[in-house]
Image (spheres, rainbow, N blue to C red):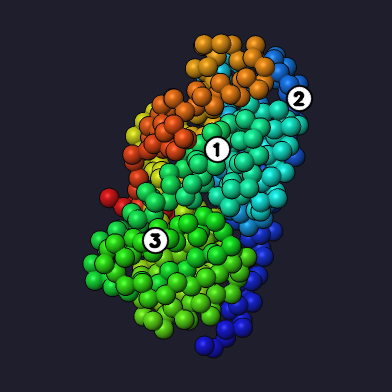
């Protein structure tokens, strides 16, 4: 096609600008909070007992998410949700009068970054528990470290198969992809009952994307649709013209993408530029408003299943939604809501445990063990709705949604519109 080189150059420039903007700063196109990896890591709780951490005025909870790399398009939203939770629960008295203190460590976008962040939070910062990491790929490497150290871990966005099974100290507030993903395919069929041919794309270097595409492909078969091709790519890719052309030549009615925000957004753009006009379903890695500056007007119409809705009834969601919109001038996304919920679980479990045995009197190893037990038996009314956990740490959640991206014609702004 004409001008392919020019378009590819423009796409590479767009991605490069996004990656540059992901490191932090409040004036990026994503309107995200400042996330300096070292800005909140100082913590006095360095003793092996919980007493020192709480007597200094705070209970340390670790937040290990991606603040740099292309994964920061998701991690920035998690930082925002966690910080809002810290402010909200401390304004309500923290843990029965003792405030919490979030300790942030940047996992970047790979396994090494997550491992280093976990080790620092466990051994240096002496946190009582960890929220993180951002990616399932990272969780399979970092979570075993926390489990061996008997430190509770709550995954805020780890939806791949077998995450809770990593260990006794691993739980998640993010519903598994097997429950969430099929909803978007069903929504696509509702919009176009004549769908027959489906093409899927997935990031082969990402554990979650590989897990998610298996669910999508099974759903396609379960719905009686024809899977015409499965195209692979890397999360670091920016040029998808070969894969997109191969798929378009097979004339699919529906395209399903499992990847992350930067690569997924660029893939959507190139599919549309090459002439694909059918429906597109995005996976959970595309479930962020940070995708909008990537594919701009081409994002319009993309369907994405949701584990959170800003309109969910409930006092705490109303408070969370107001705090987020006041701070960032847009509706809160799923990744922020899940991070908020993860912090909430720690706070409310600590409150319940403190009523049984004062947490500032417990040795840190005992506190971590008892906290893990309390997390699993609790019920929590969060922005996600009421959630709980199975004995192995799988989240129990009943409310799910599907949203469709609606963009202005010039691509300057857009939003997630929830389908009824």
Residue at (59% x, 48% y) in the render: 140
Give the structural element (helix, strand or loop) at label 1: loop
Q: Position of residue 201 (x, y in %)?
A: 47, 68
Residue under numbered circle 3: 216
Q: CA distance from mark 1 to mark 2?
A: 25 Å
- The local crowd at label 3, few if under 14, some if 14 to 19, many if 20 or more residues have their Cα within 10 Å, is many
Residue under numbered circle 2: 46
Give the structural element (helix, strand or loop) at label 3: helix
Q: Is residue 149 visible?
A: yes
Q: In the image, which is nearer the foreground, mark 1 or mark 3?
A: 1
Closer to the chain start, of discs 1 and 2, is 2
Give the structural element (helix, strand or loop) at label 2: loop
Residue at (46% x, 42% y) in the render: 174
Q: Position of residue 37 (x, y in %)?
A: 72, 42
- The image quadrant that residue 304 belongs to is bottom left
Q: In the image, which is nearer the foreground, mark 1 or mark 2?
A: 1
- The local crowd at label 1, few if under 14, some if 14 to 19, many if 20 or more residues have their Cα within 10 Å, is many
Left or right? Give the position of 56 relative to 229: right
Residue under numbered circle 1: 167
């Amino acid at each position: 096609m004409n001008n392919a080189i020019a378009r590819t150059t423009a796409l590479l420039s767009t991605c490069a600008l996004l990656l540059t903007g992901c490191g932090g700063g409040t004036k990026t196109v994503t309107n995200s909070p400042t996330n300096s990896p070292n800005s909140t890591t100082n913590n006095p709780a360095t003793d092996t007992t919980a007493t020192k951490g709480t007597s200094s005025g705070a209970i340390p909870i670790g937040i290990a998410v991606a603040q740099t790399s292309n994964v920061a398009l998701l991690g920035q939203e998690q930082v925002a949700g966690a910080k809002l939770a810290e402010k909200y629960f401390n304004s309500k008295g923290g843990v029965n009068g003792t405030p919490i203190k979030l300790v942030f460590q940047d996992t970047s976008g790979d396994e090494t970054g997550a491992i280093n962040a976990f080790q620092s939070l466990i051994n240096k910062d002496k946190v009582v528990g960890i929220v993180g990491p951002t990616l399932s790929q990272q969780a399979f490497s970092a979570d075993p470290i926390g489990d061996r150290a008997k430190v509770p871990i709550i995954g805020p966005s780890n939806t791949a198969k077998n995450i809770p099974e990593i260990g006794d100290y691993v739980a998640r507030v993010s519903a598994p992809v097997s429950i969430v993903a099929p909803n978007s395919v069903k929504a696509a069929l509702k919009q176009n009952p004549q769908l027959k041919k489906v093409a899927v794309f997935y990031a082969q270097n990402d554990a979650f994307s590989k897990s998610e595409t298996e669910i999508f492909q099974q759903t396609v078969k379960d719905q009686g649709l024809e899977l015409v091709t499965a195209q692979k790519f890397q999360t670091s890719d920016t040029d998808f013209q070969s894969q997109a052309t191969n798929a378009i030549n097979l004339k699919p009615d529906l395209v399903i993408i499992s990847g992350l925000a930067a690569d997924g957004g660029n893939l959507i753009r190139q599919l549309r530029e090459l002439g694909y006009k059918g429906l597109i379903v995005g996976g959970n890695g595309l479930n962020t408003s940070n995708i909008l500056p990537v594919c701009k007007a081409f994002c319009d119409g993309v369907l994405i299943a949701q584990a959170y809705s800003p309109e969910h009834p409930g006092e705490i969601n109303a408070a969370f939604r107001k705090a987020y919109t006041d701070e960032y001038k847009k509706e809160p996304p799923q990744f922020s809501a899940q991070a908020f919920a993860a912090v909430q679980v720690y706070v409310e479990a600590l409150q319940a445990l403190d009523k049984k045995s004062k947490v500032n009197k417990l040795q840190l190893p005992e506190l971590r063990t008892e906290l893990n037990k309390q997390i699993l038996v609790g019920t929590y009314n969060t922005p996600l709705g009421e959630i709980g956990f199975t004995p192995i740490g799988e989240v129990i959640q009943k409310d799910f949604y599907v949203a469709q991206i609606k963009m202005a014609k010039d691509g300057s702004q857009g939003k997630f519109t929830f389908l009824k």
